[in-house]
Amino acid sequence: MKALVYTAPRTLEMREVEEPSPGPGEVRVRVGMTGICGSDMHGFLGHSARRKPGLVLGHETHGVVSALGAGVDADLRDKWVSVNPLASCGRCAACRAGRQNVCADWRILGLDTTAGAFAESVCVPARTVYPLPAHVSDTEAVMIEPLANAVHLLSLAPVHAGMFPTAAIFGGGTLGAAVLSVARTRGIRVVALVEPNPKRAKVAEALGAERVLDPNTDDVAAEIYRLTDGRGVDLTVDAVGREVVRQAAAASVTRGGTVLLLGLDQGPTSLDFIDLIRREVRLQCSFTYTDADFAAAFDLVARGAVDYRPWTDVLPLSEGQQAFERLAADPGDRLKIILKP
Protein backbone atom coordinates (compact mmCIF):
# COMPACT_ATOMS: atom_id res chain seq x y z
CA MET A 1 0.00 0.00 0.00
CA LYS A 2 1.01 3.64 -0.33
CA ALA A 3 1.91 5.72 2.72
CA LEU A 4 3.23 9.21 3.40
CA VAL A 5 6.41 8.63 5.42
CA TYR A 6 8.25 11.20 7.53
CA THR A 7 11.89 10.77 6.44
CA ALA A 8 13.64 13.88 7.82
CA PRO A 9 12.72 17.29 9.26
CA ARG A 10 10.49 19.06 6.74
CA THR A 11 10.53 16.02 4.44
CA LEU A 12 7.72 13.57 3.66
CA GLU A 13 7.85 10.91 0.96
CA MET A 14 5.22 8.74 -0.68
CA ARG A 15 6.41 5.16 -0.33
CA GLU A 16 5.16 1.66 -0.96
CA VAL A 17 4.93 -0.15 2.39
CA GLU A 18 3.49 -3.48 3.53
CA GLU A 19 -0.21 -3.38 4.29
CA PRO A 20 -0.77 -4.08 8.01
CA SER A 21 -2.65 -7.16 9.20
CA PRO A 22 -5.00 -6.83 12.19
CA GLY A 23 -4.03 -8.77 15.28
CA PRO A 24 -6.44 -10.22 17.83
CA GLY A 25 -9.04 -7.64 18.83
CA GLU A 26 -8.01 -5.30 15.98
CA VAL A 27 -9.52 -4.13 12.72
CA ARG A 28 -7.89 -2.83 9.58
CA VAL A 29 -9.41 0.43 8.37
CA ARG A 30 -9.18 1.52 4.75
CA VAL A 31 -8.51 5.20 5.34
CA GLY A 32 -11.02 7.70 4.01
CA MET A 33 -9.47 11.00 5.12
CA THR A 34 -6.97 12.12 7.75
CA GLY A 35 -6.53 15.65 9.07
CA ILE A 36 -3.18 17.33 9.71
CA CYS A 37 -2.87 18.12 13.43
CA GLY A 38 -0.56 20.61 15.13
CA SER A 39 1.28 17.66 16.68
CA ASP A 40 1.89 16.28 13.18
CA MET A 41 3.36 19.66 12.32
CA HIS A 42 5.71 19.45 15.31
CA GLY A 43 6.93 16.13 13.97
CA PHE A 44 7.29 17.45 10.42
CA LEU A 45 9.34 20.42 11.66
CA GLY A 46 11.61 18.16 13.71
CA HIS A 47 10.37 19.48 17.06
CA SER A 48 9.01 16.18 18.43
CA ALA A 49 11.49 13.69 19.90
CA ARG A 50 8.81 11.00 19.79
CA ARG A 51 8.26 11.30 16.05
CA LYS A 52 11.37 9.96 14.36
CA PRO A 53 12.14 9.51 10.65
CA GLY A 54 10.60 6.39 9.18
CA LEU A 55 7.25 6.99 10.92
CA VAL A 56 3.87 7.42 9.25
CA LEU A 57 2.16 10.37 10.95
CA GLY A 58 -1.56 11.17 11.25
CA HIS A 59 -4.31 10.37 13.76
CA GLU A 60 -7.43 12.47 12.94
CA THR A 61 -8.98 9.81 10.75
CA HIS A 62 -11.92 7.74 9.58
CA GLY A 63 -12.50 5.02 7.02
CA VAL A 64 -14.10 1.68 6.25
CA VAL A 65 -13.34 -1.51 8.18
CA SER A 66 -11.74 -3.81 5.59
CA ALA A 67 -10.42 -6.71 7.72
CA LEU A 68 -11.04 -8.19 11.16
CA GLY A 69 -8.65 -9.73 13.66
CA ALA A 70 -9.51 -12.70 15.80
CA GLY A 71 -12.34 -12.16 18.25
CA VAL A 72 -13.81 -9.09 16.52
CA ASP A 73 -17.55 -8.79 15.90
CA ALA A 74 -18.23 -9.68 12.26
CA ASP A 75 -20.82 -6.89 12.06
CA LEU A 76 -18.01 -4.33 11.94
CA ARG A 77 -16.85 -5.47 8.50
CA ASP A 78 -17.47 -2.83 5.80
CA LYS A 79 -18.71 -0.29 8.36
CA TRP A 80 -17.72 3.35 7.88
CA VAL A 81 -16.17 4.35 11.18
CA SER A 82 -14.55 7.19 13.07
CA VAL A 83 -11.34 6.15 14.80
CA ASN A 84 -10.43 7.18 18.34
CA PRO A 85 -6.65 7.16 17.79
CA LEU A 86 -5.77 7.06 21.49
CA ALA A 87 -5.62 3.49 22.81
CA SER A 88 -5.15 2.91 26.53
CA CYS A 89 -4.42 -0.34 28.37
CA GLY A 90 -7.95 -0.60 29.81
CA ARG A 91 -6.65 -2.26 32.96
CA CYS A 92 -4.82 0.31 35.10
CA ALA A 93 -6.40 2.41 37.87
CA ALA A 94 -6.70 5.43 35.55
CA CYS A 95 -8.48 3.44 32.83
CA ARG A 96 -10.82 1.79 35.33
CA ALA A 97 -11.72 5.27 36.59
CA GLY A 98 -12.57 6.43 33.06
CA ARG A 99 -9.40 8.55 32.75
CA GLN A 100 -7.88 6.78 29.75
CA ASN A 101 -5.98 9.93 28.78
CA VAL A 102 -3.63 9.57 31.78
CA CYS A 103 -3.05 5.83 31.34
CA ALA A 104 0.67 5.16 31.77
CA ASP A 105 0.66 2.87 28.71
CA TRP A 106 -1.43 4.92 26.29
CA ARG A 107 -0.42 5.08 22.66
CA ILE A 108 -1.69 7.11 19.75
CA LEU A 109 -1.49 6.69 16.00
CA GLY A 110 1.54 8.38 14.46
CA LEU A 111 3.70 8.51 17.60
CA ASP A 112 6.72 6.48 18.74
CA THR A 113 6.48 3.16 16.87
CA THR A 114 2.71 3.21 16.19
CA ALA A 115 2.07 3.78 12.49
CA GLY A 116 -0.33 6.60 11.73
CA ALA A 117 -3.12 7.15 9.22
CA PHE A 118 -1.44 9.09 6.41
CA ALA A 119 -1.66 5.85 4.48
CA GLU A 120 -4.13 3.75 2.55
CA SER A 121 -4.81 1.52 5.58
CA VAL A 122 -4.18 1.45 9.33
CA CYS A 123 -4.81 -1.14 12.06
CA VAL A 124 -6.47 -0.10 15.33
CA PRO A 125 -8.15 -1.82 18.30
CA ALA A 126 -11.74 -2.68 17.42
CA ARG A 127 -12.93 -0.99 20.63
CA THR A 128 -11.69 2.37 19.31
CA VAL A 129 -13.93 2.57 16.22
CA TYR A 130 -17.37 4.21 16.13
CA PRO A 131 -19.75 3.53 13.21
CA LEU A 132 -20.65 6.83 11.55
CA PRO A 133 -24.18 7.85 10.49
CA ALA A 134 -24.67 8.29 6.76
CA HIS A 135 -25.56 12.00 7.00
CA VAL A 136 -22.13 12.99 8.40
CA SER A 137 -19.75 14.10 5.64
CA ASP A 138 -16.14 12.96 5.27
CA THR A 139 -14.77 16.36 6.24
CA GLU A 140 -17.06 16.67 9.26
CA ALA A 141 -15.98 13.25 10.52
CA VAL A 142 -12.31 14.30 10.58
CA MET A 143 -13.12 17.02 13.14
CA ILE A 144 -14.37 14.59 15.81
CA GLU A 145 -10.87 14.03 17.24
CA PRO A 146 -9.93 17.74 17.54
CA LEU A 147 -13.31 18.44 19.14
CA ALA A 148 -12.72 15.70 21.71
CA ASN A 149 -9.77 17.73 23.04
CA ALA A 150 -12.06 20.73 23.53
CA VAL A 151 -14.77 18.64 25.18
CA HIS A 152 -12.25 17.26 27.66
CA LEU A 153 -10.71 20.67 28.37
CA LEU A 154 -14.05 22.26 29.24
CA SER A 155 -15.06 19.26 31.35
CA LEU A 156 -12.25 20.34 33.70
CA ALA A 157 -13.72 23.81 34.26
CA PRO A 158 -15.32 24.29 37.70
CA VAL A 159 -19.10 24.25 37.90
CA HIS A 160 -20.49 27.78 38.23
CA ALA A 161 -23.71 27.23 40.16
CA GLY A 162 -26.48 29.34 38.68
CA MET A 163 -24.02 31.19 36.43
CA PHE A 164 -22.96 31.14 32.82
CA PRO A 165 -19.19 31.70 33.05
CA THR A 166 -17.24 34.07 30.85
CA ALA A 167 -14.14 32.97 28.95
CA ALA A 168 -11.27 34.22 26.84
CA ILE A 169 -9.53 31.88 24.40
CA PHE A 170 -5.91 32.40 23.40
CA GLY A 171 -5.31 30.97 19.93
CA GLY A 172 -7.57 30.84 16.88
CA GLY A 173 -6.22 27.70 15.23
CA THR A 174 -8.03 24.39 15.10
CA LEU A 175 -7.97 23.80 18.86
CA GLY A 176 -8.96 27.36 19.73
CA ALA A 177 -11.83 27.21 17.26
CA ALA A 178 -12.91 23.85 18.67
CA VAL A 179 -12.93 25.23 22.21
CA LEU A 180 -14.94 28.23 21.02
CA SER A 181 -17.55 25.99 19.39
CA VAL A 182 -17.88 23.63 22.36
CA ALA A 183 -18.00 26.56 24.81
CA ARG A 184 -20.92 28.11 22.95
CA THR A 185 -22.86 24.80 23.01
CA ARG A 186 -22.42 24.83 26.81
CA GLY A 187 -23.60 28.36 27.43
CA ILE A 188 -20.15 29.78 28.11
CA ARG A 189 -19.87 33.39 26.96
CA VAL A 190 -16.63 33.84 25.01
CA VAL A 191 -15.87 37.50 25.66
CA ALA A 192 -12.71 37.50 23.55
CA LEU A 193 -10.51 35.30 21.41
CA VAL A 194 -6.87 36.28 20.96
CA GLU A 195 -5.40 35.65 17.50
CA PRO A 196 -2.79 37.62 15.50
CA ASN A 197 -3.62 36.11 12.09
CA PRO A 198 -6.28 38.42 10.58
CA LYS A 199 -7.76 35.65 8.43
CA ARG A 200 -8.20 33.32 11.38
CA ALA A 201 -9.56 36.26 13.37
CA LYS A 202 -12.41 36.54 10.85
CA VAL A 203 -13.11 32.82 11.24
CA ALA A 204 -13.33 33.26 15.03
CA GLU A 205 -15.84 36.07 14.55
CA ALA A 206 -17.90 33.87 12.22
CA LEU A 207 -17.86 31.10 14.84
CA GLY A 208 -19.24 33.43 17.50
CA ALA A 209 -16.41 35.15 19.38
CA GLU A 210 -17.73 38.48 20.68
CA ARG A 211 -14.40 40.20 20.15
CA VAL A 212 -11.10 39.16 18.56
CA LEU A 213 -7.96 40.75 19.98
CA ASP A 214 -4.61 41.04 18.20
CA PRO A 215 -1.75 40.49 20.68
CA ASN A 216 0.57 42.45 18.38
CA THR A 217 -1.45 45.64 18.81
CA ASP A 218 -3.77 45.17 21.81
CA ASP A 219 -2.93 45.11 25.51
CA VAL A 220 -4.81 41.83 25.83
CA ALA A 221 -5.20 41.61 29.61
CA ALA A 222 -6.19 45.28 29.91
CA GLU A 223 -8.76 44.92 27.14
CA ILE A 224 -10.26 41.78 28.69
CA TYR A 225 -10.61 43.59 32.02
CA ARG A 226 -12.23 46.52 30.20
CA LEU A 227 -14.70 44.19 28.48
CA THR A 228 -15.65 42.63 31.84
CA ASP A 229 -16.01 45.88 33.82
CA GLY A 230 -12.68 45.38 35.56
CA ARG A 231 -13.39 41.84 36.74
CA GLY A 232 -11.55 39.60 34.28
CA VAL A 233 -13.01 36.37 32.88
CA ASP A 234 -13.90 33.24 34.82
CA LEU A 235 -11.97 31.02 32.43
CA THR A 236 -8.97 31.58 30.20
CA VAL A 237 -7.88 28.94 27.71
CA ASP A 238 -4.35 28.63 26.35
CA ALA A 239 -4.69 26.78 23.04
CA VAL A 240 -1.17 27.75 21.92
CA GLY A 241 1.33 26.69 24.56
CA ARG A 242 3.91 29.48 24.55
CA GLU A 243 5.26 31.26 27.61
CA VAL A 244 3.94 34.68 26.63
CA VAL A 245 0.48 33.23 26.00
CA ARG A 246 0.37 31.37 29.32
CA GLN A 247 1.39 34.55 31.11
CA ALA A 248 -1.30 36.58 29.34
CA ALA A 249 -3.93 33.94 30.15
CA ALA A 250 -2.95 34.01 33.82
CA ALA A 251 -3.05 37.81 33.87
CA SER A 252 -6.52 37.95 32.30
CA VAL A 253 -8.43 35.65 34.65
CA THR A 254 -10.56 36.93 37.52
CA ARG A 255 -9.90 36.31 41.21
CA GLY A 256 -10.78 32.71 41.96
CA GLY A 257 -10.85 31.95 38.23
CA THR A 258 -9.34 29.09 36.24
CA VAL A 259 -6.63 28.98 33.58
CA LEU A 260 -7.10 25.96 31.33
CA LEU A 261 -3.82 24.88 29.74
CA LEU A 262 -4.00 22.89 26.51
CA GLY A 263 -1.24 24.13 24.16
CA LEU A 264 2.05 22.23 23.85
CA ASP A 265 4.25 24.49 21.75
CA GLN A 266 6.85 25.20 24.47
CA GLY A 267 7.81 23.58 27.76
CA PRO A 268 9.19 25.78 30.57
CA THR A 269 7.18 28.86 31.56
CA SER A 270 7.79 31.49 34.24
CA LEU A 271 4.70 32.60 36.19
CA ASP A 272 4.27 34.94 39.16
CA PHE A 273 2.99 32.46 41.72
CA ILE A 274 2.71 35.05 44.48
CA ASP A 275 0.15 36.87 42.35
CA LEU A 276 -1.62 33.63 41.39
CA ILE A 277 -1.80 32.40 44.98
CA ARG A 278 -3.10 35.71 46.32
CA ARG A 279 -5.81 35.72 43.65
CA GLU A 280 -6.46 31.98 44.23
CA VAL A 281 -6.14 31.27 40.51
CA ARG A 282 -6.49 27.65 39.52
CA LEU A 283 -4.08 26.30 36.88
CA GLN A 284 -5.66 23.26 35.23
CA CYS A 285 -3.74 21.25 32.64
CA SER A 286 -5.62 19.24 30.03
CA PHE A 287 -4.25 16.32 27.98
CA THR A 288 -6.10 14.75 25.06
CA TYR A 289 -9.46 13.18 26.03
CA THR A 290 -11.23 10.19 27.54
CA ASP A 291 -13.43 7.68 25.74
CA ALA A 292 -16.46 9.58 27.07
CA ASP A 293 -15.12 12.86 25.66
CA PHE A 294 -14.60 11.27 22.24
CA ALA A 295 -18.16 9.96 22.31
CA ALA A 296 -19.45 13.44 23.22
CA ALA A 297 -17.51 15.00 20.34
CA PHE A 298 -18.89 12.32 18.02
CA ASP A 299 -22.38 13.35 19.12
CA LEU A 300 -21.67 17.06 18.47
CA VAL A 301 -20.68 16.28 14.89
CA ALA A 302 -23.54 13.83 14.36
CA ARG A 303 -26.03 16.48 15.56
CA GLY A 304 -24.54 19.15 13.30
CA ALA A 305 -23.71 21.34 16.29
CA VAL A 306 -20.37 22.30 14.75
CA ASP A 307 -19.30 22.65 11.14
CA TYR A 308 -15.86 23.73 9.92
CA ARG A 309 -16.32 22.80 6.27
CA PRO A 310 -16.09 26.43 5.05
CA TRP A 311 -12.54 26.57 6.44
CA THR A 312 -11.35 23.10 5.41
CA ASP A 313 -9.33 21.99 2.38
CA VAL A 314 -8.99 18.42 1.10
CA LEU A 315 -5.87 17.43 -0.82
CA PRO A 316 -4.62 14.09 -2.16
CA LEU A 317 -2.19 12.22 0.08
CA SER A 318 0.39 12.52 -2.68
CA GLU A 319 0.45 16.30 -2.05
CA GLY A 320 1.22 15.83 1.64
CA GLN A 321 4.61 17.55 1.42
CA GLN A 322 3.04 20.66 -0.09
CA ALA A 323 0.21 20.64 2.45
CA PHE A 324 2.59 20.53 5.41
CA GLU A 325 4.79 23.25 3.89
CA ARG A 326 1.71 25.43 3.37
CA LEU A 327 0.64 25.06 7.00
CA ALA A 328 4.17 25.81 8.20
CA ALA A 329 4.41 28.97 6.07
CA ASP A 330 0.91 30.46 6.41
CA PRO A 331 -2.30 28.53 7.16
CA GLY A 332 -4.43 31.56 6.28
CA ASP A 333 -8.03 30.97 7.31
CA ARG A 334 -7.75 27.19 7.02
CA LEU A 335 -8.65 25.48 10.27
CA LYS A 336 -7.93 22.08 8.79
CA ILE A 337 -6.15 20.58 5.81
CA ILE A 338 -7.18 16.99 5.18
CA LEU A 339 -5.30 14.39 3.14
CA LYS A 340 -7.16 11.74 1.17
CA PRO A 341 -5.44 8.56 -0.10
Image (spheres, rainbow, N blue to C red):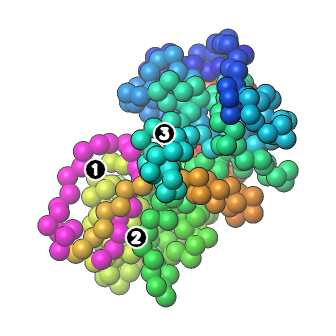
Residue type at mark 2?
Leu
Query: Which mark is first along the chain, 3 or 1?
Result: 3
Image height check: is 211 above or below 18? below
Residue 45 picture location, percent across and down: 43, 28
Relative to 175, is 135 on the left or the right? Answer: right
Residue 104 picture location, percent across and down: 42, 41
Q: Which residue is mark 3?
A: 106
Q: Which residue is mark 2?
A: 235
Q: CA distance from mark 1 to mark 3?
A: 27 Å
Query: Which mark is first along the chain, 2 or 1?
Result: 2
Q: CA distance from mark 1 to mark 2?
A: 18 Å
Q: Which one is in front, 335 or 118?
A: 118
Q: Where does the magenta region start and end?
A: 256-278
Q: Residue at x 37, y 42 (%)?
A: 265
Q: Residue at x 64, y 30 (%)?
A: 117
Q: Mark number for residue 261?
A: none
Query: Which mark is first along the chain, 3 or 2?
Result: 3
Residue type at mark 3?
Trp
**Mark 3: few/some/many CA within 10 Å (<14, 14-19, 20+):** some
Q: Which residue is mark 1?
A: 243
Residue type at mark 1?
Glu
Relative to 149, is 42 on the left or the right? Answer: left
Q: Quadrant for the N terminus, please.
A: top right
